Image (tube, rainbow, N blue to C red):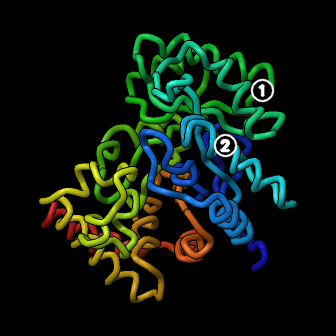
């Protein structure tokens, strides 16, 4: 499989032209931490990244906390064994010690950045993002550090994740925001009414995570599969994987499967395309744990829903959610 040219969009105020989907590296962190996805083979992870790059995906989104550094290390290993150089995005503000317990703080961002640069094996991080605005009272201090790192050239652009509009306004008084990373899917539309339009109005790029809602909208999820998930898979405890939401969500996946069948793609591609239909979204973060999963979602690089199909899915949401 060779690299293909795909439609790209400029990310916010940056000079980065990114593909409509990026590789999400959460699950490849493994299961030896509080928010794992169950056991994960590192060789499968590297193969997934290589396949994503071969398909034309030109950015990777990871975080220091994914696998407590392991995801960043796997990204570095994958990039060492390919000549393709994607944009590398990562996140900060979730630290851990020898006890492996995660602490949310915006006071150690400089040290976190140095550690991520080492693990990733890059001279500069293309997009550095505050993972969560916690604690709220440290936002200004944290964002000032982000701006300092950008000025020093350690990071090229700075963004936020899971921020409210008011929190973004506070950060903007210190330095411009290149991007916001919110959860956004047909199941989770919390940011849709106000946050996304704000980003659009202020030229803040949006990289939505969990467009398939952590696998629920792939078309491959079943009640049996959920019941058999290992205890180290965070989804086993997530509310949308419990009844009565689970049945509703799987019905939505069936609706997306119905639309997908008309185009010979999988339901997950339709789920991703539904999020990309929103004009504020620059790119969707799509996870993959092996090369086969990447093959399934790769059509989302260029697939688009018609306005009629988008309306059809929204009508289903109105009637059932």
With 34 as the anchor, is 253 left or right in this view? Answer: left
Give how far across and how far down residue 47 sits, in percent: 69, 66
Q: Furthest residue to the right?
A: 83
Q: Secondary structure at mark 1?
A: loop
Where is 77 relative to 55, above or below?
A: above
Q: Please, is residue 210 above or below residue 120 in the view? A: below
Nearest the eye: 228 or 296? 228
Q: Residue at x 47, y 60 (%)?
A: 276
Q: Quadrant of residue 55?
A: bottom right
Could you tell me residue 84's position as x and y percent?
Answer: 82, 60
For this rendering, which residue is in front, 241 or 17?
A: 241
Task: Identify residue for label 2.
Answer: 72
Q: Earlier in the sequence, mark 1 or mark 2?
A: 2
For label 1, the residue is 154
The one of 50 and 320 positioned closer to us in this rendering: 50
- The quarter of the image holding the C terminus is bottom left
> Residue 229 location in percent, x, y?
34, 61
């Amino acid at each position: 499989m060779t690299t293909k040219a795909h439609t790209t969009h400029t990310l916010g105020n940056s000079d980065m032209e990114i593909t409509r989907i990026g590789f999400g590296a959460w699950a490849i962190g493994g299961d030896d931490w509080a928010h794992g996805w169950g056991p994960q083979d590192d060789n499968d992870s590297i193969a997934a990244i290589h396949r994503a790059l071969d398909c034309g995906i030109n950015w990777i989104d990871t975080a220091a906390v994914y696998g407590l550094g392991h995801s960043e290390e796997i990204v570095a290993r994958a990039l060492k064994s390919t000549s393709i150089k994607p944009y590398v995005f990562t996140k900060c503000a979730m630290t851990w010690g020898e006890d492996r317990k995660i602490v949310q703080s915006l006071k150690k961002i400089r040290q976190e950045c140095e550690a991520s640069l080492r693990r990733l094996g890059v001279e500069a991080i293309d997009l550095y993002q505050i993972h969560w605005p916690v604690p709220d009272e440290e936002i200004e201090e944290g964002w000032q550090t982000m701006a300092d790192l950008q000025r020093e050239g350690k990071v090229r652009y700075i963004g936020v994740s899971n921020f409210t509009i008011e929190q973004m306004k506070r950060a903007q008084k210190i330095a411009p925001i290149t991007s916001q990373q919110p959860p956004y899917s047909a199941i989770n539309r919390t940011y849709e009414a106000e946050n996304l339009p704000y980003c659009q109005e202020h030229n803040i790029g949006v990289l939505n995570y969990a467009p398939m809602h952590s696998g629920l909208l792939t078309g491959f999820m079943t009640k049996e599969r959920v019941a058999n998930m290992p205890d180290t898979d965070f989804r086993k405890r997530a509310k949308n994987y419990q009844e009565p939401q689970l049945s509703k969500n799987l019905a939505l996946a069936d609706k997306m499967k119905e639309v997908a069948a008309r185009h010979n793609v999988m339901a997950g591609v339709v789920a991703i395309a539904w999020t990309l239909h929103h004009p504020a979204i620059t790119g969707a973060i799509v996870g993959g744990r092996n090369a086969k999963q990447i093959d399934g979602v790769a059509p989302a690089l260029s697939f688009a829903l018609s306005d009629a199909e988008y309306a059809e899915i929204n009508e289903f949401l109105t009637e059932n959610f």
